[in-house]
Amino acid sequence: MNEYTDLVDALAQSNLLPLWDRYMTLLTREPNPSDWPINWSWEALQPLIARATEEVCMADAERRVLLLAHPAFSPHPYTTSNLTGALQVLQPGEHAEPHRHTVAALRFVMEGDGATTWVDGQPCEMAEGDLILTPSWSWHEHANEGDRRVIWFDGLDLPLAHHLRSVFLEFRQRSGALERATKERTGDQRQPTSLTSVDVPASTPFHYPRASIAAALDELSRRADGSREVRYTNGANGGPVLPTLDCYALRLQSQVTTRAYRSTSSAIAVVAQGCGTSCVGDKTINWKKNDIFTIPHWHWVTHRAETDDAQLFLMTDRGLLDAMEYLRIEYE
């Protein structure tokens, strides 16, 4: 025993560790997620959103954003293992100044219209149900020229970027006419993105309108469990919209439970419309429009709609895991 202790001490002095005493901890038989399903009710969020708009002015904040922080990752503001979700609020007449960062992000509009996001100089009008991309190192800014507040879901690969220690941030002054020089990105030039089997105008390569999503879902036949699912894809290669963020629209049939599955990928679900129930692991989540909940990796999942129009927007890290050959999906 003493000889073994001496060996461990000698290894430590040379910055070495034995594998044999921690083999089954480092290489587990299956994933053992540290987080659990968690949900945020749109109704419960309203007073906090109201306080944020009243007490935090844009002059004092780079962005008026409420981070969806899972306590399992405290003190880090992460929502799942590789993904962070948030709510951003822009009041009429407000403007979020231009910046860019290596963290990839997207915006799913939950309430309101009349705002615009500029991505590398290209305007993307924001309306409820639209998805807008801000790829890594893209200049982006937001302005609300409408007459009511606009709220959108922010999705980012922040946990992954932090883990890789690869975060850069840069600011730029606002131009008077809100016009942006085109394609100041260094390096690669991205091809326009588009929804599967749906053409998105080339003038808005970062914008997926709600109508295009609905049309794509309408074209699909229902699966055996009554659901229809469309993947938002990059038109250049048919892959995920961004290398680290992979998005889906899931339409559910009323009173039909979807087939149970579990995956090594995680997801954040935003209720685009309707109401229903999801069972994630041993937790049952009742949801309605604009509620948000997480689907941690390696939890069994089913969904059941209570209305005919129920639809979920899902932001996942599935494409990333697939590219790394870490993706595994199991069905019951």
Image (cartoon, helix red, strand yellow):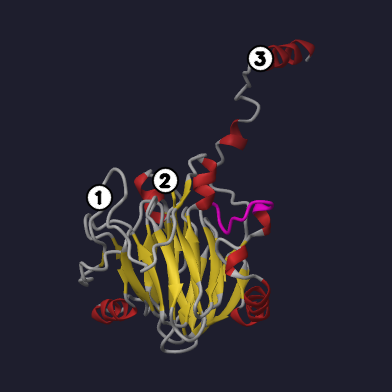
Residue at the farthest bottom position:
307
At label 2, counting other C-alpha atoms closer than 10 Å, the crowd grade (few under 14, some 14-19, many 20 or more) is few
Foreground of the two, 282 or 58: 58
At label 3, counting other C-alpha atoms closer than 10 Å, the crowd grade (few under 14, some 14-19, many 20 or more) is few
- 272 horizontally vs 46: left or right: left
Quarter where residue 23 is shown = top right
In the picture of the structure, the residue carrying the numbered disc 1 is: 189
The CA span between labels 2 and 3 is 32 Å
In the picture of the structure, the residue carrying the numbered disc 3 is: 11
Q: Position of residue 258 (x, y in %)?
A: 44, 74
Foreground of the two, 179 or 112: 179
Q: Amino acid at mark 3?
A: Leu
In the picture of the structure, the residue carrying the numbered disc 2 is: 326
Q: Upstream in the sequence, badge 2 or badge 3? A: 3
Query: Is 236 drawn above or below residue 302 in the view shown?
Result: above
Q: Are marks 3 and 1 in contact (CB under 8 Å)?
A: no
